[in-house]
Image (cartoon, grey):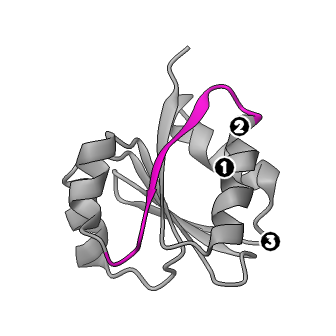
Amino acid sequence: MKRTRILLSGMPMIMLEFMKAIFMSHPDLYVAGDVPSDLNLSGAVRRYRADVLILMQPDLTTDRVMEIFNCRPSKVLTITENGRQGMLYFLRPHLELLDDLSVRKLVQAIRAESQGE
């Protein structure tokens, strides 16, 4: 089974620990690292070989998303500060609103691409 490598960025410590705990219960999902949001995200994606980048930065510009995608990840997921909504960006031109974000929806969103959905 291929493990999906996840990079977390810009999260308060409590959210970071919460996310790590979520993914520990899913053997196919692996938190490769966590970095501050002001770090060069493109470089961090390359360094950690991330398949998915999850950010606490809901206001990503299209140019910023494209810059990140040039480095490899198949998905970028942004989460709002209150943790209740997210935006899922795919490498292909696709954007999806994730309303009422839950653990189940988060895991489904990450797995969707690798399962050919």
Q: Which residue is mark 1?
A: 20
Q: CA distance from mark 1 to mark 2?
A: 6 Å
Q: Is residue 41 left or right of residue 27?
A: left
Secondary structure type for disc 1: helix
Q: Callout 2: helix, strand or loop?
A: helix
Give coordinates of residue 96: x percent, y percent: 56, 64
Residues tagged 3 and 2 counted as in contact (Cβ below 8 A): no
Q: Quadrant of residue 83?
A: bottom right
Q: CA distance from mark 3 to mark 2?
A: 22 Å
Where residue 63 appears, x then y in whole percent? Answer: 23, 76
Q: Quadrant of the N terminus?
A: top right
For badge 3, the amino acid type reads Asp
Residue 3 location, x and y as percent? 52, 26
The residue indicated by pointer 3 is 100
| Disc 2: which residue | 24
Q: Is residue 72 visible?
A: no
Outermost residue, front side: 13
In the rendered structure, which amino acid carries the disc numbered 2?
A: Met
The boundaries of the magenta stretch are 25-38
Residue at 35%, 59% in the rendered image: 93
Q: Depth-wise, is mark 3 or mark 2 nearer the camera?
A: 2
Dot 2 alpha-carbon crowd within 10 angstroms: few under 14, some 14 to 19, many 20 or more? few
